[in-house]
């Protein structure tokens, strides 16, 4: 058994457009996915995540590079010979069949004995909490239930890997949250590797063991949710996952607390954490997340404390979102947690208030400019 | 709309009413009095012969058009490029632009004893096969153009577009993701065709067969141009209401295709053909 259940080795996929041009949907992507992992492909629409998934399923073949399943190169193996199953975004349920027939379909194609089919379909439907719905037609079910049928239909075949293409995209927010937890629980229960395609960063962070962030056909960063959020390796990842304030800067020098960058707009220097290979003199993007900006009456860290003024506040219960204007007219967002229960409006900041924004070096990330 | 419906249903009702009158044999006049004697006349063996012949032909033509139309429609909806699809559409629709009569007479020449088809068959060395077919008492005749085989060929040709178009429309509506799901679940292409594509395009097949079946049931031109002396329903209706003035019997004959179609539609509905519409 190979260490990785799925490997993409330098995979490229080009499509011909109807106008006769060529588009590169997936651009030299390499991925290694371990057994039993909940792995997400995250990125904006058109980033190549769905195409990557479809190449694993066998609906598309790479223009160059290789997809390996359990160590075996797949080449042009058609979908019906691959030990993976897909949950489609549109569910793709067979409308002319009952729930039972839908779930049994894959087993019947494998010529599984009828008694075993009955047993396994029952098991699968129980797993997705649809027992008793066997004789319904898909159109008699709600969106969430159809989703579960699609899930049961794929899981009943006990694939090595389950591929999920934005499976919760069509559900409303509340149901989506519930299904996120359910999917994660289910994955831990069955122990099958899940590869999950989504454009919803919160969904990816909540559910995944590891995430690959993609943009314009390239895999930008692979890592755990914490790594992706706390140490994004480029401006795009920092911007796409959560929120971030950015300053344009220029690398000056490394020192014992990280590196120093000049920020012309703030007319100051900041000390922060360099990510990746940076060289002095290089143009960089300096980022700090809103919840990591500390607002105070006093400066607390040399040049990393910047004078500013409150422009606008939004009270949202657990937090107050504060829009600050710093020296040189640069505006940034700061989120202050409301840790004390009080009715005093001053506790939630007032527009016009003069403050210090403390950008502590451990919270400031210095990223290569895209 | 209401007015159209009124005219349409009104004439059908008149037809039904007329079929319960009878023709006085002496005077040759229609007697407007309720009777079932016309239907008694209809259910005589010679008339039932005509009914079965017509229905059998309609069934055969329908089956043949399904068999011919399905692969073509499938190719058009799945594999053809935009350009090919346009050309195929044109090829399917172009015959409908020329007169139906012209096409039927053209076929008479093609199928005639000295026609191009017979010439081709004899040069291909299949004369024996053709003779064997023509000597069959049920479907044969003196030549292709004067036999039920000829009628069958021409019917199949003229109604084929009416089968291709609805099947093609139904196939176009089968989402690609369903085919991918089927393949993903382990179905080989033929299994996908049988288990997914065929059931989902069934409404198209039913729609097409309604066309081919009812058009064949009612047609009187093809059998009179090409056939031998055995009659079809359309011809009988024409001769009864025209030459012999037996409007009640013509009306009774007309009821047969209507009843057959109603039964057919009910069966189709029972089979779930209209669920996916």
Image (cartoon, coloured by chain):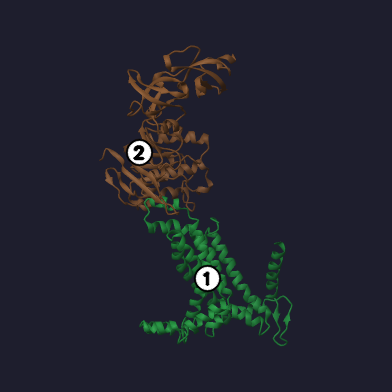
Chain colours: A brown, B green
Looking at the figure, which quarter contains the N terminus of chain B? bottom right
SS state under label 1: helix
The one nearer the camera, B188 or A140, is: B188
**Mark nearer the viewer, 1 or 2:** 1
Let me know if residue B194 appears in the view.
Answer: yes
Residue A41, by quadrant, is: top left
The one nearer the camera, A221 or A3, is: A221
Q: Is residue B202 left or right of residue A121?
A: right
Question: Around disc 1, counting alpha carbons within 10 Å, would you say few (fewer than 14), some (14 to 19), or many (20 or more)?
Answer: few
Question: In x, y percent, where is residue A306?
Answer: 47, 17
Question: In x, y percent, where is residue B235?
Answer: 59, 80
The answer to whether B107 is drawn above or below residue A288 in the figure is below
Question: Around disc 2, counting alpha carbons within 10 Å, would you say few (fewer than 14), some (14 to 19), or many (20 or more)?
Answer: many
SS state under label 2: strand
Question: In x, y percent, where is residue B176?
Answer: 45, 53
Chain of the residue on which disc 2 is drawn: A
**Residue at numbered disc 1:** B94
The one nearer the camera, B264 or A295, is: A295
* Residue visible at 56% across and 17% down in the picture: A348
Question: In x, y percent, where is residue B175?
Answer: 47, 53
Residue A260, by quadrant, is: top left
What label sits on residue A81 in the rendered view?
Answer: none
**Residue at numbered disc 2:** A193
Chain of the residue on which disc 1 is drawn: B
Query: From mark 1 to mark 2, how far is it between C-alphas?
Result: 55 Å
The answer to whether A266 is drawn above or below residue B58 in the figure is above
Q: In this view, does A259 lie to the left or right of B37?
A: left
The answer to whether A145 is drawn above or below residue B196 in the figure is above
Q: Residue furthest left?
A: A1
């Amino acid at each position: 058994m190979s260490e990785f259940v799925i490997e993409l080795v330098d995979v490229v996929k080009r499509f011909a457009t109807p106008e006769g041009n060529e588009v590169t949907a997936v651009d030299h992507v390499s991925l290694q996915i371990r057994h039993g992992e909940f792995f997400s492909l995250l990125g904006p629409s058109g980033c190549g995540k769905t195409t990557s998934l479809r190449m694993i399923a066998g609906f598309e073949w790479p223009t160059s590079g290789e997809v390996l399943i359990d160590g075996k190169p797949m080449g042009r193996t058609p979908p019906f010979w691959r030990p993976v199953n897909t949950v489609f975004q549109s569910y793709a349920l067979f409308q002319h069949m009952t729930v039972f027939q839908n779930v049994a379909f894959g087993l019947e194609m494998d010529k599984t004995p009828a008694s075993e089919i009955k047993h396994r379909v029952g098991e699968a439907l129980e797993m997705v909490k649809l027992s008793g719905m066997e004789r319904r037609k898909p159109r008699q079910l709600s969106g969430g239930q159809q989703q579960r049928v699609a899930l049961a239909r794929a899981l009943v075949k006990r694939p090595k890997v389950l591929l999920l293409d934005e499976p919760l995209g069509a559900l409303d927010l509340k149901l989506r949250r519930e299904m996120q937890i359910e999917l994660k629980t289910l994955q831990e229960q069955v122990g099958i590797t899940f590869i999950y395609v989504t454009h919803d960063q919160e969904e990816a962070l909540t559910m995944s063991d590891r995430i690959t962030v993609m943009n314009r056909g390239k895999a930008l960063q692979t890592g755990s949710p914490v790594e992706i959020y706390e140490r994004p390796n480029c401006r795009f990842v920092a911007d796409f996952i959560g929120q971030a304030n950015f300053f344009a800067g220029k690398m000056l020098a490394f020192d014992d607390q990280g590196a120093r960058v000049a920020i012309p707009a703030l007319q100051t220097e900041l000390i922060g954490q360099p990510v990746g290979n940076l060289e002095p003199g290089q143009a960089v993007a300096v980022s700090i997340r809103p919840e990591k900006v500390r607002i105070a009456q006093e400066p607390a860290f040399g040049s990393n404390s910047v004078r500013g003024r409150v422009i606008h506040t939004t009270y949202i219960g657990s937090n107050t979102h504060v829009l600050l204007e710093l020296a040189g007219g640069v505006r940034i967002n700061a989120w202050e947690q409301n840790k004390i229960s009080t009715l005093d409006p001053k506790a939630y900041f007032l527009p016009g208030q003069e403050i210090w924004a403390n950008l502590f070096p451990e919270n400031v990330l210095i990223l290569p400019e895209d | 709309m209401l007015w159209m419906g009124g005219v349409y249903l009104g004439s059908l009702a008149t037809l039904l009413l007329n079929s319960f009158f009878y023709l006085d044999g002496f005077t040759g006049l229609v007697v407007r009095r309720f009777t079932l004697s016309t239907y008694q006349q209809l259910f005589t063996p010679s008339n039932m012969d005509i009914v079965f012949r017509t229905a059998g032909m309609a069934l055969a033509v329908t089956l043949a058009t399904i068999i011919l139309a399905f692969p073509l429609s499938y190719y058009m909806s799945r594999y053809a490029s935009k350009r090919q699809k346009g050309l195929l559409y044109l090829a399917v629709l172009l015959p409908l632009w020329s007169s139906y009569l012209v096409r039927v007479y053209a076929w008479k020449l093609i199928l005639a004893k000295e026609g191009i088809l017979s010439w081709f068959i004899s040069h291909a060395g299949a004369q024996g096969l053709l003779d064997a077919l023509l000597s069959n008492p049920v479907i044969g005749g003196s030549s292709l153009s004067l036999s039920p085989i000829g009628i069958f060929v021409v019917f199949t040709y003229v109604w084929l577009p009416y089968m291709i178009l609805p099947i093609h429309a139904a196939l176009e509506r089968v989402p690609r993701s369903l085919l991918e799901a089927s393949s993903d679940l382990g179905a080989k292409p033929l299994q996908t065709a049988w288990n997914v594509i065929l059931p989902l395009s069934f409404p198209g097949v039913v729609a097409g067969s309604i066309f081919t079946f009812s058009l064949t049931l009612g047609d009187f031109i093809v059998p009179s141009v090409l056939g031998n002396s055995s009659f079809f329903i359309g011809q009988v209706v024409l001769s009864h209401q025209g030459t012999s003035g037996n409007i009640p019997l013509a009306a009774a004959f007309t009821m047969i295709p209507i009843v057959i179609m109603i039964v057919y539609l009910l069966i189709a509905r029972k089979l779930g053909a209209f669920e996916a519409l």
